[in-house]
Each structure stands twice: as C-alpha cells, then as structure tokens.
Image (cartoon, rainbow, N blue to C red):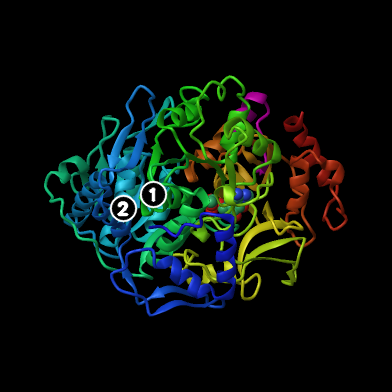
Amino acid sequence: MPFLLDSPEAVAQARQSAAVDFEAFWADVAGHYEWMNPWHTVCDWEFETPRVRWFDGAKLNMTANCLDRHVAAGHGDRNAILWEPNDPADDTVAITYAELHGRVCRFANVLKSRGVGKGDRVALYLPMVPELAVAVLACARIGAVHSVVFAGFSARSLADRIQDAGAVCVITSDGMKRGAKGLALKAVVDEALAECPTITTNLVVRHTGEDVQWNTDRDVWLHEALTAVSGDCPPEPMDSEDLLFILYTSGSTGKPKGVVHTCGGYMVYAGYSFANVFQYQPGDVYWCTADIGWITGHSYIVYGPLLNGATTVMFEGVPTYPSPGRFWEVCEKLKVNQFYTAPTAIRALMACEPRFAKGHDLSALKVIGSVGEPINEEAWQWYHDAIGGGECALVDTWWQTETGGILISGLGAHSPMKPAHAGYPLPGISPVLVDGDGNTLEGEAEGYLCIDRPWPSMIRTTYGDHERCRNVYFSAFKGKYFTGDGARRDADGMFRIIGRVDDVVNVSGHRFGTAEIEDAIDSHPAVAECAVIGYPHPIKGQAVHAYVILKDGALPSTEEGITALRKEIGVQVNTEIGNIARPDRIQFTPGLPKTRSGKIMRRILRKVASGEHDQLGDTSTLLDPTVVDGVIAGAAEFLA
Ligand code: WTA
C-alpha cells in the first residue's frame, strides 16, 4: 500500500526519476492514497509570491486515508495506538484501527454538535493522552483546522495563539501528569480564555479527576457530550489545498507565527517519509517520544504512522520517571522496532550509563532515529552502540515545522551512515547550499541551506500574514526557500547540519526566538534592556544566557536580593512564554557591547558565554570597547 523504497537500488532509481521529472515522481507517490476526486495539476508554483499548490482539483479526507481505508482492507483489529501512561504501574492501552475510527467519528460529531465546522479553527491544549490524537483526527474528519499548543506553554502564549487563529473552540483536560509532577491545565485555559472572546466551547477531557472551575456558558465535559452523539460521521471532502492545520513556531523576530499546512500535499509527504525513513513493516511497533504539540508529533506520531496502517506508541510521561531506564523498559515491554527521539534525551540518558540502558532486551529494534537538533558524534556513537547494539540503522532526520516532513535523512538500512551527518536528501527533495551573496555552491562546501524546488508538505503561508511568509523564507535568496540553517556537504554529497544561522535558539530541541525571550525579560519592571543568546550546553544542546541591564538603583545590594531578582525574571519568562524558555543564566551587567549605530554585537556575547573571550575578534567598531571587560568579568561566575 505505501510507496516503499525497499532497497538501495530502489532508492537510487527513485532519486533518478525525481530528478528527471519531479511532478511525475510525486504523482506516482500520491497514487498510493485514496482520493475522492483526481487532481488536474500536480504542482503549480513560484517562489516569489510565493505560490505553492499541490494536487489542485483533487478532493480527499486525511482520516479516510488514516482510518477507513485500513478498516475496509480488513485491518480493523490491528493496533493503531499503544498508549503508555505516565505511571508504569498502569497498563498499556491498546486502541485498534476499528476502535480509533469509532472514537474519531464520535468526537467529530461532538464538535459538530457544538457548531464547529469546516474551516473553523480549534485549539488543542492537552497532555499526551489518546484523546489528543483522537481530537486531531476528529478535526481533520470534519475539515476543522487544528492548532495544537504544547501543554508547557503559558496562558499568555495560549491566548496569543487562540487570538491569532481566531479559534472558536478549545479542547483541554482537567489536569496533566508529567513524571512526578502535575499541572492544572484547565486552570491555565480559564486564564487564557479571559482574553479570547472568539471561543464558544471549551471541551474538557476528564483525565486526572482533579477539581476544576466550571463556566456553564462554554465548558463541556467530553465524556458527557459523547453520550449524546452517534458514531456515524462521514469524512468531509476537502480540497487538496484546504487548510489541515496551523502550528505556531518561533522565528528570529516578532511573535511566533502560524505555519500553515494543507490537506493533500501534507498527507502525501507525511506517509511517504514515514514509510521510507523508518522502513516500517506490517506488524512492527513504532515509537516516537515527541509530544504531539510539536511538528514531530503531528507528522510522526499521528499522521505518518496512521497513513501507513502502523502501530504507533503514545507516551504520556518523561524519560527519567520513575527512573532513567523508562524508555528502555517501554522498548522492551512493547517490543519496539523503530524508536525515534531527540539528541537532548540521548545525551541525558547517556549520562546515566551503564546502569539504566544495560539489562534491557532491545533486540527488537531495527531503526533508531534522532530529530530536533544536531547530534554530536559522542551521542551518535552511544546511541548506535548502547541502544542500537551496533546493528540498527541510525537515521539522523533533518527537517522543520515549515517543511512538514523529514527532508534529509538516511532511509532505514538502505543508506550509508556517518556519525553526526543527516546524510542525503529524500528522493524528490532538492537542497542547495548558497553563500552570503546567494551563489550556489557545488561539491564539498559549507553555506546556507536552501531548497530550490517545491515538495508536497512545504509551508503554504503564515496564518493571516502571507507577506511574513515571503519575507522570512523566500526573500533572502531569490527563487529559493531558505531554512535558517547552515550546513556542510562532504565529498560524498552527505549533509551535516551545523545549526541556526539566525537569532533562533534551540534548547533541548525547542525553538525560541531570542527576541521573544528578550521581550519577556524586558517586561519585568526592574529591567532597562537585555540581550539573549544561546550557548553550548552538554545536555540541552543550547541553553539561554541573558545579559540584563537593570534600571538605575534596581540592582539589589545582597546576594539573596540578587538571587530573588533572578528568580522573578525567570518567573516573568515562565508567565510570558512557558517554563521551557526560562534562561539558565541571568547576568546583570552595567553595559552591552554596541556598535556606533547602536546595534548589539551578539557575536561578542556568544563568545563570552561560551568561555571564548580570548577569541573575540575585532572589537574596534564598538562604541565603547571597555564595556567588554565588564561583560567578561560578570560572566566569570557562570564559567567557573
Ligand atoms: C533543527 C523540528 C540538526 C534545525 C523537526 C531546524 C536539526 C530546526 C535536526 C527546526 C537535525 C531539526 N540535525 N538540526 N537532525 N532536526 N534541527 O521546527 O535547526 O522544531 O531548523 O522542527 O531544528 O525545528 P522545528
């Protein structure tokens, strides 16, 4: 059923045919799905406006492909989801394709009964419980546009996203469990909704059973609403370019933007990339440890696996609860065949070796994957040897919220592996490296990573602001999509991703704009000005160092006072964005290195925070070079 390249020769051939005629190639891939209506044009595109349309004229429904098709093929009793709860004493919950189909239809009818219809935006703010996957699919069933907001974001961030999308409905739960901790999710939503007049329904999943405040005008218990609806809900026919979802992500400027993905192209690419990167075989158990609040969860927990009729594991907990052996316990228990996680988790668990990884039977593993940030050689090697037993294919998958799916990666065991290298583009993907002037670099080279041809799951627009999409992604290099990443290509043509070249930091695989964190810190009444940069961190990849200039007289005179002020500023970031963006270091400084035109020289701040203040380079263009000495002296306490 899926378009599966099952040998190195098949991969080479696909690469070849995509190079000759990429539209014919993608039409061939798309032919492996169920369409209600055929397309009249495979791809209509230009990267100036930009305008990107795939499979125009076609009609489809994502869930008909994720669910009905498998049930109709007689696979209704196959497990679709294996849910692994936070508490290891609780049993794994298995949901078959037939059951999932039924639950999605009922949930969809609840949405309809609340007046939610095609094109309406629905915000999801939920823990990793099966209802999250069901809610995503229920939206897709009726053509509502889902906007999943990671449940670690603050009320402020949730409200911003609801307002930007003009959402009419929010779906949440009473509370959530994360390791030994809990979070009162409904209370966060209540706070956000005070500023969100467009919301008419707040659908609440009962999960922890804790007490919640209730607003009878808009709050509805899901379990009560489900008793009043039928299980019959035909899939809404969607145009290929109708919106499937919005997912907010950070860039170098402004508030997070709503990346828009559409139905047809996203479906084609999510299914294609899942099948080929993970080389999934019927009966395999696949586990991606991400949260559905991020793009990785959208494409590789929900849509990609279900399009392929796979069994996908959903994990509610965290890697270290109740012990750092949890991942490996679950892998052993569920006989996981494909395992997909982030370098930050790998590094954290590597630090616990050998007690926790050893002694677990990981022999079912065939493919292990990495995503979200560059994986360093040491972590790569440990993952390969200690977890993969030296025998698994290790796929380092490079992609972005904007790309919708994995663009550069090994394909199971059918590609050569090289530590810390993502490798070759998937067949059909055309990455190029350019220099600062936009000249295309050939052969072995290092430069800005761009893509010069469309692919089905690429970003269509930023919600409500197409000019922003053009400006951020299509204006830096004419005729090309610019990723914001720097990369190196070796003599064999394999890519190694270096990291962001813009003002985006990647903390434990989570993206933040430095400006976004600066805005949060600036909103503290004692702060006059600040600058935020990322510095290398052994576990998180990058961590946040904030240089803060306080208003006159605001610097506390005691150690305790300073500690308390740092804490307050941390709480401010927590309130404005979420705990995940909280700076690791807050350095109070009398000045910041600025050029004569008033621009902060971040390069200097990065070097200082990395402990490389002997390599500052040219500082002669600074307005006041002596400021640098103060910055270096102030950083000393963090670098000891
Ligand atoms: C980084 C996550 C190196 C990169 C899917 C990109 C990576 C950003 C890799 C996107 C990788 C992702 N190697 N860097 N395998 N995967 N990145 O939107 O900087 O949360 O631009 O999507 O993560 O982050 P996003």
Q: How far from the left and from the top, in percent, is residue 260? A: 44, 63
Q: Tag count in the figure? A: 2
Q: Is residue 547 magenta?
A: yes
x, y percentage for residue 334? 40, 32
Res. 46 visible in picture: yes
Of residues 382 and 192, which is closer to you in this image? 382
Look at 39% across and 68% down and name the residue there: 31
Q: Foreground residue, 143 or 557?
A: 143
- The residue at 56%/25% (across/down) is 357
Residue 173 in which image quadrant = top left
Amino acid at circle 1: Val
**Which image quarter holds the N terminus?**
bottom left
Report the disc number at residue 137.
Answer: 2
Disc 1 secondary structure class: helix
Position in image of residue 483 (x %, y %): 61, 61
Q: Which stretch is magenta?
A: 546-566
Could you tell which of marks 1 and 2 lies nearer the N-terminus? 2
Check the image and report above or below for 121 versus 374: below
**Could one spot residue 429 in this view of the protein?**
no
> Residue 302's mark?
1
The three-letter amino acid code for the residue at tag 2 is: Leu
The reply to whether the C-beta atoms of the residues labelled 1 and 2 are less than 8 Å apart is yes
Residue 361 versus residue 633 in the image, above or below: above
User: Residue 550 at what x, y percent from top left?
Assistant: 66, 42
Disc 2 is placed on an element classified as helix
From the viewer's side, name the closer residue of 15 and 184: 15
* 45 falls in the magenta region: no
